[in-house]
Image: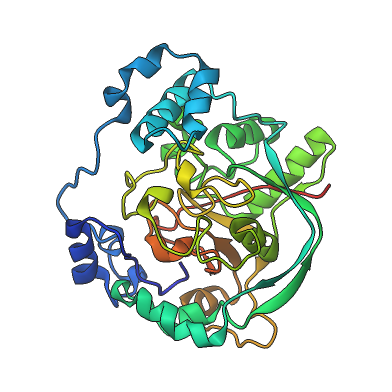
């Protein structure tokens, strides 16, 4: 969500949807409280109970079994979440700091971006949450991209992986999501967020030095191609927003979740959490697509230029989970942005 973009979305619970319409619809989220931007009232809201309480049997399972449960679309959402939560405490075999799981994406010539005639349609579909045309116009016009074969991480970089980077390098880019800079042990397999794009670049460079491989952040074009499969779909899973497919405000727990627990939202190439949990910095600074005009939103006015972020997050609504959506970081806690690695073969 770019600066000046309001939160809200279809599929929210009635209370949350009403609050979004009353407090945030048509309102710049940077000018209201974060709770108002998320469509939450001032009073306490209980979204869900501890998933482990409902699945205590998982406490006796081996990590390898839990990892299978987390990734299975045949298990219920609560059970997948519970399995991931137990793994965060006992050690998650899916998280390999020096050998992250990477997925092969073939070379292709693809059409990316949004046709100009669809800008009004998309704006109208999300207008109830305050989306205005200039934000969607950033996705237009479409353009052809020749993308070489590359690899991309199945999961965004986790807290545990980022901790290893900080311990090895003694860098001071402490995540804003770690209270007082203290590592959140119970969230070890959750995505890290609240670091600047320079820290993401430094992480990729560090991992490249440690492994002899060529890690980096994906380009904007690579990210959109990997998220959509290159067929122009609206969301990684299809054409219609589904709250059960991504950790967003509509149905999520209002906090990060262990990576990979939203199995129904997996992209065509097998990426997890590409549409929710945390937003993701890519390698590119914002610029208009070929033939397009710059969008003078809050981010451009405040920073002059900014690093593009893609995908939705637990603090945002489904409008950001669209594969074409372009946004970036603004200095508010509601901007929960992490990153995902790419690799040049």
Q: Quadrant of the N terminus?
A: bottom left
Q: Is residue 246 visible?
A: no
Is 257 placed above or below 312 here?
A: above
Question: Residue at horizontal 81%, vertical 50%?
Answer: 344
83 vs 163, left or right, is: left
95 vs 90, left or right, is: right
User: In this figure, what is the number of numbered marks?
Assistant: 0
Q: How is the image coloured?
A: rainbow
Query: Percent x, y for residue 212?
Result: 85, 37
Question: Residue at horizontal 43%, vertical 85%?
Answer: 120
The residue lying toward the viewer, choosing from 111 and 283, is: 111
Looking at this view, name the residue that lies furthest to the top: 60
Is 118 placed above or below 242 here?
A: below
Query: Percent x, y for residue 296?
Result: 52, 84
The residue lying toward the viewer, choosing from 16 and 323, is: 323
Is 41 placed above or below 6 here?
A: above
Looking at this view, name the residue that lies furthest to the left: 43
Q: Is residue 45 visible?
A: yes
The residue lying toward the viewer, choosing from 267 and 312, is: 267
103 vs 68, left or right, is: right
The residue lying toward the viewer, choosing from 296 and 265, is: 265
Question: Residue at horizontal 42%, vertical 82%?
Answer: 121
Tell me which corner region of the image, top left, top right, bottom left or bottom right, holds residue 187: top left
Tell me which corner region of the image, top left, top right, bottom left or bottom right, holds residue 213: top right
Query: Percent x, y for residue 286?
Result: 62, 72
């Amino acid at each position: 969500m770019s600066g000046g973009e309001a939160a809200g979305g279809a599929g929210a619970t009635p209370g949350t949807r009403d609050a979004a319409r009353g407090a945030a619809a048509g309102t710049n989220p940077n000018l209201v409280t974060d709770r108002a931007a998320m469509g939450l009232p001032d009073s306490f809201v209980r979204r869900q109970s501890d998933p482990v309480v409902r699945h205590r049997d998982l406490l006796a399972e081996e990590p390898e079994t839990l990892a299978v449960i987390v990734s299975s679309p045949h298990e219920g959402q609560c059970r997948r979440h519970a399995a991931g939560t137990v793994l965060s405490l006992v050690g998650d075999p899916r998280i390999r700091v020096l050998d992250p799981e990477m997925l092969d994406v073939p070379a292709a010539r693809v059409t990316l971006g949004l046709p100009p005639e669809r800008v009004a349609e998309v704006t109208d579909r999300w207008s109830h949450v305050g989306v205005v045309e200039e934000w969607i116009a950033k996705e237009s016009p479409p353009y052809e991209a020749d993308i070489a074969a590359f690899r991309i991480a199945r999961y965004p970089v986790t807290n545990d992986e980022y901790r290893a980077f900080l311990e090895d390098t003694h860098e001071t880019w402490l995540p804003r999501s770690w209270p007082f800079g203290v590592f959140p042990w119970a969230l070890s397999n959750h995505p890290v967020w609240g670091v600047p794009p320079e820290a993401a670049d430094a992480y990729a460079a560090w991992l490249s030095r440690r492994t002899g491989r060529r890690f980096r952040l994906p380009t904007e074009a690579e990210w959109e191609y990997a998220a959509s499969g290159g067929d122009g779909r609206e969301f990684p899973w299809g054409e219609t927003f589904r709250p059960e497919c991504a950790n967003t405000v509509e149905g999520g727990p209002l906090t990060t979740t262990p990576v990979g627990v939203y199995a129904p939202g997996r992209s065509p190439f097998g990426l997890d959490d590409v549409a929710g949990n945390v937003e993701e910095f890519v390698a590119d600074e914002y610029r208009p697509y070929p033939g397009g005009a710059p969008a003078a939103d809050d981010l451009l006015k405040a920073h002059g230029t900014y690093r593009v972020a893609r995908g939705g997050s637990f603090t945002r609504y489904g409008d950001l989970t669209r594969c074409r959506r372009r946004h970036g970081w603004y200095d508010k806690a509601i901007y929960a942005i992490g990153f995902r690695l790419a690799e040049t073969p």
